[in-house]
Amino acid sequence: MNVDLRSDTVTKPTPLMLEAMWSAKVGDDVFGEDETVNALEEKAAAMFGMEAAIFCPSGTMTNQIAIKCFTQPLDELIADQTAHVYRYEGGGIAFNSAVSTRLLNGYRGILTTEMIEPEINAENIHYPHTSLVVLENTVNKGGGACYTLNQIAPIAALCKERGLKLHLDGARVFNALAHTGDKAVNYGNYFDGISVCLSKGLGAPVGSVLLADKATIKYARRIRKVLGGGMRQAGFLAAAGIFALDHHVERLHIDHAHARILADELAGCTWVSNIIPVETNIVLFDTIEPADAVLAKLAAKGIKAGSTDKHRIRFVTHLDVHADQVEYVISVLKSI
Ligand SMILES: *Cc1c(COP(=O)(O)O)cnc(C)c1O
């Protein structure tokens, strides 16, 4: 049996999703004439209580556009040291926006006002002007750790008081919502920008949306064009996104249950030294042997996974990991 636990990006469109894509009504989206893209943008914005949205090829692009929209060159943004925008977007913060980054040490990537406030620079020509805070929910490198809206509200209040914008890298925000029980529509009260990936746990082949107010999204269309992200008959892809929002949100609790089952099993394995508590669909655990040696044993049994450190392995559950595959992984974990 083959099981791919490397990432929730490896999912392939389901037959029903493909059908929705085939039958999409499309037009030239650079002219604003693709009705399926327009429908996706309206739907996503409404879901999160935001005014407008823009469909982009990747979450990297939606995050980088947001940073560009919310900063000026020479500004500084605040993020956790694990942040995807800093670590995994190729240095785009400096390249695209000419902005520096103040990195904080959150708990599993989760920040608090107590951590953020002292790092906001005073008005002084020596210091870059702090203009943006970026949160990530769930935190990828934090093992899928979640913010609740109760944790976000004071950060949003601080940003408002100090004149900072607040952006959410919500690549896996639906996983956070499934875990916390918070309502998506309330997110719009707290963030200036929200990036949502359709191609992670939601199972679309391509695409992310950036949500913000109308003026920001108008400017974002300019930045997307500059980055080469203006797509033409993108409705075929947007249709997959709409399908994902309609059909693949409610099921995320299954992925979370699978992750918990795997973590429970790992807890009984003598070759595992530590497991990060599971909140969503990511399991991070430390191995006594080097991770590469364990990964090779798993690969020999048809199980793909990745390492995030010399002794740390990451399992990610998703739409294409079914209950029988979880059973199979458990049998292999017992045997190695
Ligand atoms: C995957 C991911 C993104 C966006 O990645 P793309 O591969 O560019 O779509 C952004 N933030 C986080 C936390 C992610 O996990």
Image (cartoon, grey):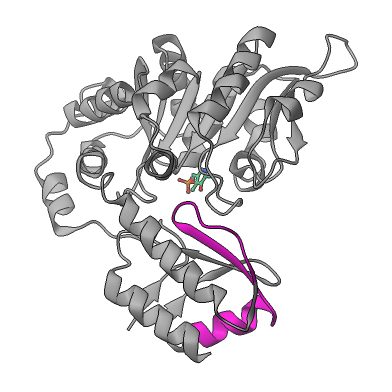
Q: Is residue 238 above or below residue 218?
A: below
Whether residue 302 appears in this view of the structure is no
Relative placement, left or right, of 174 versus 103 is: left
- Which residues, given as a range, are shown in magenta? 274-298
Q: Residue at x 30, y 59 (%)?
A: 319
Whether residue 247 appears in this view of the structure is yes
Q: Front-most of 97 and 79? A: 79
Q: Residue furthest right?
A: 126
Where is the N terminus found, in terms of image quarters?
bottom left
Locate residue 15: give its quadrant. Answer: bottom left
Q: Residue at x 40, y 32 (%)?
A: 182
Q: Is residue 126 magenta?
A: no
Q: Is residue 260 above or below residue 74?
A: below
> x, y percentage for residue 17?
17, 51
> x, y percentage for residue 155?
62, 22
Relative placement, left or right, of 131 versus 15 is: right
Locate residue 135: give its quadrant. Answer: top right
* Number of numbered markers: 0
Q: Is residue 158 above or below residue 275?
A: above
Q: Residue at x 57, y 81 (%)?
A: 269
Q: Is residue 69 above or below residue 269?
A: above
Q: Is residue 291 magenta?
A: yes
Relative placement, left or right, of 150 versus 29 is: right
> x, y percentage for residue 145?
55, 47
Locate residue 30: give its quadrant. Answer: top left
> x, y percentage for residue 207?
36, 42
Q: Residue at x 24, y 25 (%)?
A: 38
